[in-house]
Image: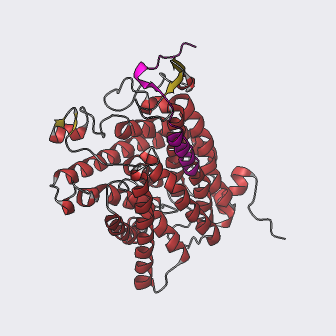
Amino acid sequence: MLLASVPDELFGKVDSGTTAWMLMSAALVLLMTPALAFFYGGLSRQKSVLNMMMMSIGSLGLVSVIYVLWGYSTSFSGEGNYLGLFDNPFKYFGLDQLMETKTSGEDTLVVLNAAGSGLPAIVFAGFQLTFAVITVALISGALAERVKFGTWLLFTGIWTTIVYLPLAHMVWGGGLLSNAEGGIAAKLFGTTDGKATVAPIDFAGGTVVHINAGIAGLVLAIIVGKRLGFGNQSYRPHNIPFVMLGAALLWFGWFGFNAGSALGANATAGLAWVNTTAATAAAMLGWLAVEKFRDGHATTVGAASGVVAGLVAITPACANVTPVGAIVLGVVAGIAAAFGVGLKSKFGFDDSLDVVGVHLVAGLIGTVALGFLAKDTGLFYGGDYKQLVVQIVIAAVALAFTAVLTAVIAFALKPLGWRVDKEEEADGIDNSEHAETAYDLV
């Protein structure tokens, strides 16, 4: 197979400290998908827990293979930028090209993710792979207890290819939602030195991960339909300790998600770490306060959900707000998400495990709030309206892009069958889809 040539400017010396930091960050983010399996599994009913966990684990398997083959190249190959939507999917197909080396005197030069970065491109590819995996897995919570595993995996492959990978390119790979000269922000407010004068801010994935997964979950919940008995019965979590374990591991892994997005062990990573902790803690308190005043009880599931809401909201903002700003953002996100989970009851869609209420609501808040809270450019820090406009526009474009394409995929797969039979759903999807049960009680 003829391999594409790597531009000479991408060859450079490895920075071992940066490389070690990013390998550890990638491992932390990878942990988030099994953590999500515990979080979602605990929230499910006993007869559906294995299927719920398998939807995350299945995504881990399939998306990882896709990312190695054409995923990285579609988002980050730097060749093509077709309509600002995606790069050439075949330039670095299989990633072997990223292992080329050159010699310069006594030094061995490797392929870096960016000129002079010191970070091997193969390590950056591994880091980005983990983001793709967790994004798809997040969607599964909107479909709990009623979807065929095979259809879910087919959706996973198609959605990753035509939704996630292009959106990652649009935001982080120099596409329409980046600070590139041809991007939307540049067209709105002009350029300075070839970059958008008012750059969109999405440090670690408010649009790419959370708005993306949240709106996809909403679309699928509407198209696939409600669980049997929705609105007439209570769906109680079967294992709250699983929920807390999953939330704790998500919080731990999220430091790789946010601090790792600094692409180095530096002060920016430190700020992202502190802001991630501050916002998450504040969101948990905000959610619990809503529960206490509204319902009379501060619940364990509420605490876990508040943790996730805070993590989601701070993701796009963690390197661009002050620690106090992170606390403010966390409180607002925790309160809003606590009310947001009630949207499914109000509008009658079955978002089983609150992907919309947590990820879409908190993701939108974290992205748009940067127009107010971003240090130097936000309205609360002496900036003008432009940052807010840019943040609203990139959020709106991400919403529309994902909603339309997700609907197309969902309807295209309908002839194959999304739903298990009613009898199988009533009996328990674990037994019908996997021929297993989580607990054999004697």
Residue 73 image point, x, y percent: 47, 28
Which residue is pictured at 35% across the width and 48% down the height? 202
Quadrant for residue 407, please give it.
Answer: top left
Decide: is 200 above or below 230: above
Residue 144 image point, x, y percent: 57, 58
Q: How many numbered badges does the structure rendering display?
A: 0
How is the structure coloured here? Answer: secondary structure
Which residue is pictured at 43% across the width and 75% down the height? 285
Decide: is 284 above or below 122: below
Residue 202 relative to residue 372: left or right: right
Quadrant for residue 234, please give it.
Answer: bottom right
Residue 138 image point, x, y percent: 51, 53
Residue found at the far bottom of this picture: 296
Task: Look at the image and say whether residue 404 sits in the magenta stretch.
Answer: no
Q: Which residues are magenta?
A: 1-29
Which residue is pictured at 32% across the width and 62% down the height? 322
Residue 187 image point, x, y percent: 18, 37
**Residue 232 appears in the figure:** no
Q: Which of 264 and 306 lies nearest the eye of the viewer?
A: 264
Residue 191 relative to residue 81: left or right: left
Q: Which of 43 and 312 lies nearest the eye of the viewer?
A: 312
Location of the C terminus by quadrant is bottom right
Location of the N terminus by quadrant is top right
